[in-house]
Amino acid sequence: MKETVVSGIRSTGKLHLGNYYGAVKNFVQMQNDFNCYFFIADLHSLTTHPTPADLHGNIKHVLVEYLASGIDPETSTIYIQSDVPEIAELYLYLNMNAYMGELERSTSFKDKVRSNPDNVNAGLLTYPVLMAADILIHKATKVPVGKDQEQHLEMARTFGNRFNRLYDTPYFPEPYAFNYSEKLVKVPGLDGKGKMGKSEGEGNAVYLSDDPETIRKKVMRAVSDGGPTEENQEKPEAIQNLFDLMKVVSSADTHEHFSDLYNKMQIRYGDFKKQLAEDMIIATAPMRERIMDVAKNDTYLRQVAKHGAIKARESAQKTIKEVRSLIGFKSF
Ligand code: AMP
């Protein structure tokens, strides 16, 4: 039997190149080898209090972009998290055995408290419990996530094992972080400091739906410097980031060509950025076209969401029935 994979992306906006090369591309490659559940994490996005219109629009972006990237709703199960209320029910049960101390020690919680001191809500604190429910609801063993998520996976194992101990049965298997393509990709942003992300500020991220002119403008404005001052010098972070982006979207020959020019101090950043922008445009063009096509087809989107919810609920209802029985809920 194929192993079960679960992964989701928060519906907090459009997908960028980091989401695609770090996560969604892997989803597409692994769908034939595993029993895959890919979901749109709209419950998770509520910690940031979106307006109803933004919430709906963002869910649609992720659904459209999953499909445009090549996830096949027949081979995999694509669903919207809030369409599967069993996840919220399991989250409630798991919360009873998740302790304040361990939740407060989570690195991502501490980061969020630091960056958003005015919105430290209980949903943020129990975010790893909801993530554990997302995974355990399908009894998944493999979770394709980035390195940043390893601690959450460890917490999911802790909560699953604690449930197993409490009810004295090896019910939940242990889920592990998993990277299908072996090497972990971290896509840098255009602002010269760290990774591409939705919340890293305007101009940092290139979205799959960006048109060619927008991509050119963003790349030409990317942070660089005055150029190399010595042959074969180590590249500063902003320049290394642009080369790393080139590695993701351009051919190996192109990357080598510009690396050589840099090492010989002959690089012209204008040409380098122009090439990077054109290769990004080529890499994203087929998806951009499909995004526009799929976004127009509301009937198809409705069908996919409905079909996905049915398949995901089938698996989730089986788990919840067994969990309720293990906990001791019985009908009179
Ligand atoms: P997020 O947008 O933070 O909800 O992330 C959704 C998924 O995309 C996760 O699996 C992340 O590991 C992945 N991801 C987000 N940003 C990047 C990036 N810059 N490089 C690689 N993977 C990323």
Image (cartoon, helix red, strand yellow):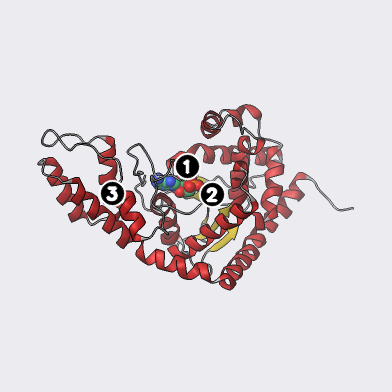
Residue 50 in picture, x, y percent from top left: 61, 47
Residue 281 in picture, x, y percent from top left: 32, 60
Residue pictured at 61% horizontal, 41% vertical: 47
How many tags in the picture?
Answer: 3
Confirm or reject: label 2 Cβ below 8 Å from ligand 1: yes
Residue tagged 3: 220
Mark 3 or 1, closer to the camera: 3
- Which is nearer the N-term, disc 3 or disc 1? 1
Q: Amino acid at mark 2?
A: Thr
Residue 199 in picture, x, y percent from top left: 47, 42
Residue 26 in picture, x, y percent from top left: 42, 56
Residue pictured at 28% horizontal, 38% vertical: 238
- Which is nearer the N-term, disc 1 or disc 2? 2
Residue pictured at 53% horizontal, 46% vertical: 175
Using the image as rendered, state which of residue 217 and residue 331 is in the foreground: 217
Q: Is residue 177 visible?
A: no
Which disc, if any, is residue 199?
1
Residue tagged 2: 12
In the displayed image of the protein, which residue is found farthest to the right? 332
**Circle 3: is it few (<14), some (14-19), or many (20+) Cα within 10 Å?**
some
Q: Amino acid at mark 3?
A: Met
Q: Assign a secondary structure to mark 2.
A: loop
